[in-house]
Image (spheres, rainbow, N blue to C red):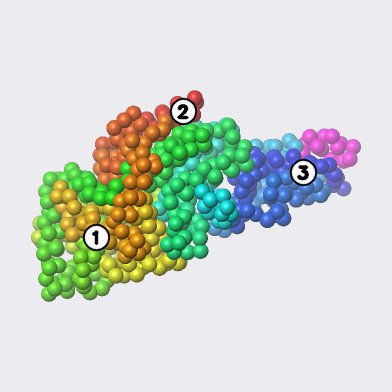
């Protein structure tokens, strides 16, 4: 007859199960559950050992009765896509014991539980999970809507991801900050930061930016709600998240290090600047910390990058762009342009906004390729990683394809095919119509409307064609500023934009940002390096690399200077962690 152990072991058992590993249903010291619903959880949720009811509010177990049995713990991701089971078979050994062996039974019980959990938490199994692409777990955190108004008690649920694959007790906490798009859980499996995490025994977290992805603080994207979309609110989100998780997960003595690339890179640096008591260091890759209204240097770097392939390349692009502008001045050529560029709608030019949108869209083919040229971001599953500056310039210099204008159309057609698009949507009126839709279900809710708002109210960053040192024309600063008013109303005029940009630089310091233990990696081929820190001891300037190149996984074809940059980043992090 199997014995019944009627001893109150539940509190201990709950602590053992839920504190030793964040991958078993609840994080270390139990903050969030990995069940398929957002935090906070119902107090009635039962994930304790058989016979124990776990109070999810404070992660304590209430004793009912504990019987030896086959322990089966099932971990379900919120996507419901996979189930991971850890089974510890202890019932057979324990059930053979008799009441006369009570003491021995208790000892065996604890040994068996410890052994099972020990194997689950073993470095071997955790690394095995990583190799199987665990991708962390989707979690939710109750966040405040307005951190700067104590009277506003509204809250919302912010998404984040968690991965303890390489975590060792006392190790640092790596916090990857999300930006102007959906947080990609692939970063929980790939990237240089995971290489650093493995070497330093770090816990890895990825937090999604408010108003992006599934982190919806409000019912829609109306202007009245977008008032809460600001970088200072996003930083306060991170601070509140870090403070609560710190205590709940017993990480009060761990050093937190922020990571981010591009706009999130700026957030990482600004987090260290504004909340130095909460974050020990930051790696701000390709961070445009200097806000600017007219970012005309962007296309100058594009010109330089095209020229680095072969000098004639940007000259041929300019020839093609100038030819197109000449054709746009003749209404009888609209049909030809529509056919040449496979436009979705018959070309109609009613204003400079219409022509500007077409010209900027076509220039974007070169701008995007230059910005991400030869990076290692295939793990994010983007399209077009095989299209490089070499490919585009190869087409532009292929005289067998016709005059430069004809080659320009071939570039556009190649990109359409690569992105699996049947036609080129170059209608400004349709663009405005899509962007005015404030629903979370609207196409522009992918981040387009949100980032346009942040550009108009904080950063500018308008990549105009005003400079003469680049090959494109037709989308001046005035075209960019008009978009703010078309999308958000006449109140968002050029004066408001200029004042907003000035305020941002006054608040954060621009390229003269203060603060210690911040690393600023930047690539010379990345147009955004112009607005970043590249010339002091905090900077790591990498010749020949593009946007956020240091963040991506290592590749045998990486430039030697990129490999050295990653080594330098790790060296600084290792030094700081050991301080």
Range of magenta residues:
96-109
The percent position of residue 154, horizontal first and vertical second, equals: 57, 56
Q: Residue at x 81, y 49 (%)?
A: 64
Q: Nearer the viewer, residue 266 or 151?
A: 151
Could you tell which of marks 3 and 1 lies nearer the N-terminus?
Answer: 3
Q: Residues within 10 Å of mark 1 (few under 14, many from 20)?
A: some
Between marks 3 and 1 in the image, the one whose residue lies nearer the viewer: 1
The percent position of residue 290, horizontal first and vertical second, equals: 32, 43
Q: Which residue is mark 2?
A: 576
Instruction: Residue 101: say if magenta.
Output: yes
Q: Report helix, strand or loop for mark 2.
A: helix
Q: Is residue 137 left or right of residue 464?
A: right
Q: Nearer the viewer, residue 61 or 102?
A: 61
- Give me the C-alpha separation between circle 1 and circle 2: 46 Å
Q: Is residue 326 left or right of residue 520?
A: left
Could you tell which of marks 1 and 2 lies nearer the N-terminus?
Answer: 1
The percent position of residue 438, horizontal first and vertical second, equals: 43, 66
Q: Which residue is mark 1?
A: 479
Q: Residue at x 81, y 44 (%)?
A: 95
Could you tell which of marks 3 and 2 lies nearer the N-terminus?
Answer: 3
- Give me the C-alpha separation between circle 3 and circle 1: 66 Å
Q: Residue furthest right?
A: 100
- Give me the C-alpha separation between circle 3 and circle 2: 40 Å
Residues marked 1 and 2 touching at CB (< 8 Å): no
Vertical comparison of 282 with 332: above or below: above
Which circle marks residue 457 in the picture? none
Q: Report helix, strand or loop for mark 3.
A: helix
Quarter of the figure with residue 356? bottom left
Q: Report helix, strand or loop for mark 1.
A: helix
Q: Residue at x 55, y 37 (%)?
A: 167
Q: Which residue is mark 3?
A: 10
């Amino acid at each position: 007859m199997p014995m019944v152990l009627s001893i109150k072991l539940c509190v201990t058992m709950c602590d053992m199960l839920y504190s030793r590993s964040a991958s078993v249903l609840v994080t270390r010291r139990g903050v969030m559950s990995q069940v398929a619903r957002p935090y906070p959880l119902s107090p009635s949720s039962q994930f304790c050992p058989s016979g124990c009811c776990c109070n999810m509010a404070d992660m304590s177990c209430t004793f009912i009765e504990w019987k030896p049995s086959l322990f089966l713990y099932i971990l379900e991701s919120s996507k419901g896509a996979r189930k991971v089971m850890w089974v510890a078979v202890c019932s057979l050994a324990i059930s053979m014991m008799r009441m006369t062996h009570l003491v021995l039974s208790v000892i065996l019980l604890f040994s068996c539980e410890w052994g099972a959990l020990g194997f689950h938490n073993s470095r071997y199994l955790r690394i095995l999970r990583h190799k199987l692409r665990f991708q962390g777990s989707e979690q939710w955190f109750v966040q405040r809507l307005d951190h700067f108004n104590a009277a506003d008690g509204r809250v919302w649920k912010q998404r984040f991801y968690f991965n303890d694959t390489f975590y060792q007790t006392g190790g640092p906490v790596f916090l990857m900050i999300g930006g102007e798009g959906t947080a990609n859980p692939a970063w929980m499996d790939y990237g240089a930061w995971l290489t650093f995490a493995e070497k330093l025994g770090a816990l890895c977290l990825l937090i999604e930016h408010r108003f992006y992805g599934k982190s919806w603080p409000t019912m829609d994207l109306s202007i009245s709600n977008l008032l809460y979309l600001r970088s200072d609110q996003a930083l306060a989100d991170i601070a509140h998240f870090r403070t609560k998780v710190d205590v709940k997960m017993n990480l009060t003595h761990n050093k937190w290090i922020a990571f981010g690339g591009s706009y999130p890179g700026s957030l990482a640096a600004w987090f260290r600047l504004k909340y130095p008591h909460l974050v020990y260091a930051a790696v701000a890759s390709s961070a445009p910390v200097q806000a600017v209204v007219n970012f005309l240097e962007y296309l100058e770097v594009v010109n330089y990058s095209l020229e680095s392939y072969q000098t004639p390349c940007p000259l041929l692009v300019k020839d093609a762009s100038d030819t197109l502008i000449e054709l746009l001045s003749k209404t009888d050529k609209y049909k030809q342009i529509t056919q040449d560029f496979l436009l979705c709608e018959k070309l109609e030019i009613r204003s400079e906004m219409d022509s500007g949108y077409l010209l900027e869209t076509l220039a974007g083919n070169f701008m995007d390729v230059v910005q991400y040229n030869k990076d290692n971001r295939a793990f994010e599953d983007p399209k077009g990683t095989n299209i490089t500056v070499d490919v585009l310039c190869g087409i532009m210099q292929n005289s067998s394809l016709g005059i430069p204008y004809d080659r320009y159309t071939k570039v556009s057609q190649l990109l359409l095919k690569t992105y699996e698009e049947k036609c080129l949507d170059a209608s400004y009126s349709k663009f405005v119509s899509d962007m005015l839709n404030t629903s979370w279900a609207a196409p522009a809710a992918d981040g387009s409307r949100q980032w346009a708002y942040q550009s108009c109210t904080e950063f500018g960053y308008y990549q105009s064609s005003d400079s003469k040192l680049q090959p494109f024309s037709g989308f001046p600063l005035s075209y960019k500023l008009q978009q703010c008013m078309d999308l958000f109303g006449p109140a968002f005029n050029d004066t408001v934009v200029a004042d907003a940009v000035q305020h941002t630089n006054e608040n954060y310091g621009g390229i003269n940002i203060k603060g210690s233990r911040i690393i600023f990696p930047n690539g010379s081929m990345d147009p955004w390096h112009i607005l970043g820190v590249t010339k002091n001891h905090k900077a790591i300037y990498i010749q020949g690399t593009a946007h956020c190149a240091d963040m991506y996984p290592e590749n045998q074809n990486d430039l030697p200077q990129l490999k050295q940059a990653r080594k330098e980043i790790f060296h600084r992090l290792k030094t700081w962690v050991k301080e």
